[in-house]
Image (cartoon, helix red, strand yellow):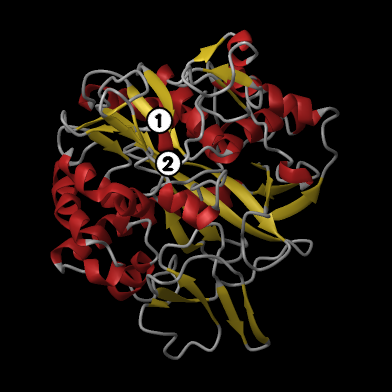
Amino acid sequence: MKRRKVTPRPGWQRTVESQGFEFHTPEGRPYWDESACYTFTAREVDEIEAATEELQQLCLKAGQSIIDNNRFDDLHIPEAARQLIRDTWESEPPSLYGRFDLMYNGAGPPKLLEYNANTPTALLEASVIQWYWHQDAARGTDQFNSIHEKLIAQWREIRPYLKSGLLYFTSMDDAEDATTIGYLRDTAEQGGIRTSPIAIDRIGWNDSAREFRDLEERRIGNIFSLYPWEWLLKDFAGPLVETFPRMIWMEPIWKMMWSNKALLAVLWEMFPGHPNLLEAHLDGPRTMREFVKKPLLSREGANITLRTIAGESATGGPYGAEGYLYQALAPAAAFDGMNPVLGSWYVTDQGPAGIGIRESAGAITDNLSRFVPHYFQ
Amino acid sequence: MKKSRAVELILLASAAAGCGRRQCVDERDIVVEDRYCQPPYPGGGAHGYRFYNGGFFGSSTPVGSSVRSTGTIRGVFGGSGEAAHGAGGGAGE
């Protein structure tokens, strides 16, 4: 694994915009960065792919363990969700994707930092934008990227299980989220599913019909939400719970078990010393002298505390009331002073699908990190 | 297989091209001709016409919950996200 400085394509801003990627430079700061790229060997890509499949299998075992041992208190999952999680874990309603965030330096096995299994973004840039970059700027090489085809293939699998009517896609009214939703709609349409977008705050609840409705007063029978389950439940739990199983919610509610950082502690309890895991605990750092303290439900690097022998640094944010995870530091992976994190995509029933890389000058990957393309040969 | 063979987008590029454009919408958030948001039709009021700036869904951002004549309540979701990240923030990670 190496980091290479490369020359950006002339007019790349117009190029990526024409591909549907508008927020390449949000608020004047670069996010899409093609002045550098990461290169891998085929062996390294095989290692990342195998680790991703392995981690998915471990998470399946951990999910079963959480249910069997009633660990919902450890995950701070509200009472209203627990039976639904048990039910949907068994009934397996449609599920699409997730993104493992891995620390990797090419010298040792990939290490799981967290699993964004409920509302992962940075998808279009991983699936499409870096693919077209590869076509333009790295011909003769390969890219670990079949995300697009696997998403469409999975939508085709999902289609027979949907209720009648449209599949709605919802998120907050935000550029990144809306781009992700737009791209997912695109792949769903290509998978033969009719879709419609609706902002999360425009979803209607009709109390007499006991159903959610769109702006045309049509019943919502299927919805893909890029608004996390913990917020859906906090906002409007009672009526929401009532819609099961008449309504398909994607991702399924059992993903609350995987998108929660307590999953990392459960994994370590079950598979201590596993080469793709980092030591992690819920009750404190125990004997770890250097560790990261993460809120169970934080997003975009918020409220993270990094404790090293040299001292402590922390990011701000609104999270933490739900409790914390204490996780060992991953082996260093710095290239030209930048710290890359691999987002390894897993498409349900289709397998490991490809990677996107975000790098930061600091040790914590947050919403100021940059997306940098990759290739391998 | 590591490599994508064909990447074709149907919806996204055209959707992105429409982002950020000011549009006149009616009380049901349906886009209408701009003249309805201009005199003699005042924005808001009984007609409910108003300009909506930006947005990604072709709908306006509500202020709190609202109940329409159909009995449908809107604005039931979104409060937790706004409390965490503020209006206009996202929830993806």
For this rendering, which residue is in front, A336 or A79? A79
Other-residue count near label 2 (Cα within 10 Å), few / some / many at <14 / 14–19 / ≥20: many
**Residue A375 image position (x, y, % from top left):** 66, 41
Quadrant of residue A32 in the image? top right
Q: Earlier in the sequence, mark 2 or mark 1?
A: 1
Task: Tell me if I can see residue B80 in this picture.
Answer: yes
Alpha carbon of mark 2 to alpha carbon of mark 1: how far? 8 Å
**Residue A6 image position (x, y, % from top left):** 83, 43
Quadrant of residue A203 in the image? top left
Mark 1 = which residue? A169
Quadrant of residue A217 in the image? top left
**Residue A259 image position (x, y, % from top left):** 38, 56
Q: Residue at x 85, y 39 (%)?
A: A7
Q: Which mark is residue A226?
A: 2
For this rendering, which residue is in front, A45 or A160? A160
Q: Residue at x 74, y 41 (%)?
A: A25
Quadrant placement of the C terminus of chain A: top right
